[in-house]
Image: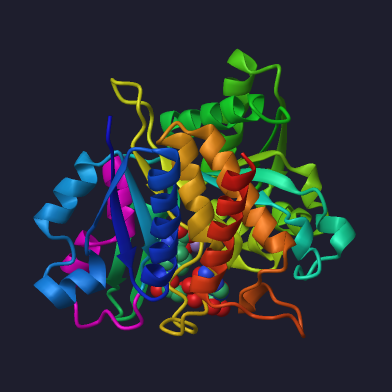
Amino acid sequence: MTIDIVVLPGDGIGPEVTDEAVRVLDWFVQHRAVPLRMQRRLFGSAAWAAERSTMPDATWNAIMAADALLFGATGSLDQTHIPPDERRKGSLLRIRKGLDAFANLRPVKAQPALAESSPFKARTVAGTDMVIVRELTAGMYFGTPRGVETQPDGTRRGVNTHSYTEAEIARAARFAFELARTRRGHVTSVDKANVMEAGRLWRDVVTEVHEAGYKDVTLEHMLADNCALQLGRAPTRFDVVVTDNLFGDLLSDCAGAINGSLGMLPSAALSAPREDGRRRALYEPVHGSAPDIAGKGIANPLGAILSAAMLLRWTANAPAEADALEAAVQAALDAGARTADIAMPGETVLSTRAMADAVIAALDAGLSEA
Ligand code: NAD
Ligand code: IPM
Ligand code: MN
């Protein structure tokens, strides 16, 4: 059975890091017979430049038919030349919604070799191993009414709506509890129940789901502002963190500091299982297009490569291969491989390509030991 992967490199450093993730996946096709078939497609600004459409029909159809997407990054500095309707058509948010990929897993694991690259104390971050489950298809990103309107006095007013239904909260909560059962059995649910009605509902529904079927998992509630603090103060206290779309976005960037760079963090966005039991899936590093370093070949590809490991685990059903890839990333870091974002003064700095080479060398070494 072939697994069809649509590769969407996107903007900025997206193509640079995605090329390396594809090269690593090709290693598994060649050496471990993982049956992946990868096809590259343009969308967004790159597709607009090439075809005057941010989402050509062929790309959308390929996305909807694929077993999974491997996504680079979106966001070019200047999109003002693209009509607003076209910008929306080719947006990452439309893809997430189209896939109904509501469960966004953002794992954060402290790499022992990077303890000094973290702005936090080594003893604070050591042993951190958590997964943020960010609800990805509702909340502030999608709520209506939304827009900018001109008021009677001629001044403008911007509106977005933080909206959650019970069903949207419950499925995120269930996903988090199920995931916790495969880990250390602890869920921290994060909201602003003290100020927002939708936050109050979030807390109530998570509690109800817990009471109804997950009493074996421990549940704590935490306010989002305190959670931002605790991620820097005591990150080892977290196992699974479940939160809404906007807080999940902010908190995962905060967690990026644990290994010293956002370039280290992977993600997977999953739908509910379909009739055949398989989930639609979108794999992407947590970082964006990083216009400040794009085109220089210096971006850290490990977030993208670890996203490829999540693809092996969740879509290819190849946990041993996923473990092997995560171990190869750790081995490369342990051996001193560093891109600029995680290097300490005096350390040798590798290019994007050379960092991926170090991971592939570690995979080759594992193969010759096996
Ligand atoms: P960013 O994540 O692109 O960059 C934040 C900082 O982290 C920058 O200093 C950047 O150089 C650094 N960084 C990010 N990835 C790195 C990597 N792999 N290696 C080394 N350093 C890395 O966020 P931003 O600058 O706020 O946003 C830039 C654009 O990206 C915006 O248009 C934004 O909308 C978009 N964005 C897209 C995604 C996505 O595609 N999923 C995520 C975040 C931001
Ligand atoms: C992320 C990004 C996206 C988000 C942007 C690019 C829409 O920041 O994946 O974290 O806000 O979800
Ligand atoms: Mn983000």
The quarter of the picture where the N terminus appears is: top left
**Residue 190 at x, y percent in the picture:** 64, 44
With respect to residue 216, does 110 lie above or below?
Answer: below
**Residue 184 at x, y percent in the picture:** 73, 30
Residue 178 visible in the snapshot:
yes
- Rendered residue at 76%/68% (across/down): 118
Q: Does the magenta segment cover residue 87?
A: yes
Residue furthest top as drawn: 212
With respect to residue 345, does 187 lie above or below?
Answer: above
The quarter of the picture where the C terminus appears is: top right
**Residue 329 at x, y percent in the picture:** 62, 55
Magenta segment boundaries in residue numbering:
76-99
Q: Does the magenta segment cover residue 105?
A: no
**Front residue (pair 241, 336):** 336
Q: In the drawing, does residue 20 fall left or right of residue 230?
A: left
**Front residue (pair 246, 89):** 89
- Image quarter where ligand 2 lies: bottom left
- Asked which quadrant contains residue 231, the reply is bottom right
- Rendered residue at 54%/72% (across/down): 354
**Front residue (pair 79, 205):** 79
Q: How is the image coloured?
A: rainbow
Total tally of numbered discs in the picture: 0
With respect to residue 350, does 333 lie above or below?
Answer: above
Q: In the drawing, does residue 176 fall left or right of residue 142?
A: right
- Rendered residue at 39%/57% (across/down): 22
**Front residue (pair 30, 148):** 30
- Rendered residue at 36%/53% (across/down): 70
